[in-house]
Amino acid sequence: MARNFEILHDPDAFVPPSTAHADRGVLQNRAYLEFDASAVEAMYSKAVQMPAAYTGSGTLKADIHYSCAVATNKVDFEISVEALTDGDAVDMHAASSFDSVNAGNETVPATIGYLGVLTITLTNKDSVAAGDMFRIKLERDADDATDDTAAGYARVWTVCVYEEV
């Protein structure tokens, strides 16, 4: 399948909430977000405009490029989408309007520090359309005892949102 656009979110494209957020770091000149294994932590991407190439007829997905401090068990991430159109009834000064979460999990790479790519289909996408102001909330679901069993941190290196057609 082909991608008709990509929005790449590097670690600097995310802002923390006032509490329960991932830490930032740099390792081997690569920036990352570090999500803890014992607490649910989140980060919010900076807003971008959904590209004109977005048709809405394909499948909106996100690839999370990550590595872990362990080489066993599973890691679970969630992505929520917020899409705002000119005239939407959302007070930008007081509220956010994220859609329901889209979740995904997978077994972490078998070697500590190796790169894994978790793809999440963004079924709940807040009726996003080309031209909308678009952002995501990224969260490690560390309190999910079934789907997030990896001890130790998970470092996120990039998140790439795209439409697959």
Image (spheres, helix red, strand yellow):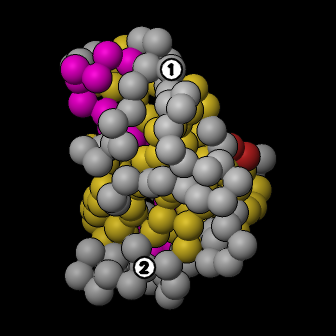
Q: How far across and how far down the image is residue 116, in percent?
A: 40, 52
Residue range in magenta is 54-71
- Residue 24 in view, yes or no: yes
Residue 120, numbered circle? none
The answer to whether 54 appears left or right of 10 in the picture is left
**Figure quadrant of residue 76:** bottom left
Please name the residue that numbered disc 1 is placed on.
131
- At label 1, which amino acid type do we have? Gly
**SS of the residue under disc 2:** loop
Image quadrant containing the N terminus? top left
Indicate yes or no whether the magenta region holds residue 69: yes
Please name the residue that numbered disc 2 is placed on.
142
Image quadrant containing the C terminus? top left
Q: How crowded is mark 1: few (under 14 residues within 10 Å), some or many (20 or more)?
A: some
Q: How far across and how far down the image is residue 53, in percent?
A: 42, 12
Taking depth in this image into account, of 89 and 73 the one nearest to the observer is 89
Q: How far across and how far down the image is residue 12, in percent?
A: 73, 46
Q: How crowded is mark 2: few (under 14 residues within 10 Å), some or many (20 or more)?
A: many
- Sequence-wise, which precedes: disc 1 or disc 2? 1
Which residue: 68% across, 78% down? 19
Taking depth in this image into account, of 75 and 58 the one nearest to the observer is 58
- Relative to 143, residue 6 above or below: above
- Residue 8 in view, yes or no: no
Which residue: 50% across, 87% down? 38
Which residue: 34% across, 42% down? 125
- At label 2, which amino acid type do we have? Ala
- Relative to 118, residue 165 above or below: above
The answer to whether 30 appears left or right of 137 in the picture is right
- Relative to 73, residue 157 above or below: above
Q: State how far apart marks 1 and 2 are (Cα).
A: 34 Å
- Relative to 76, residue 59 above or below: above
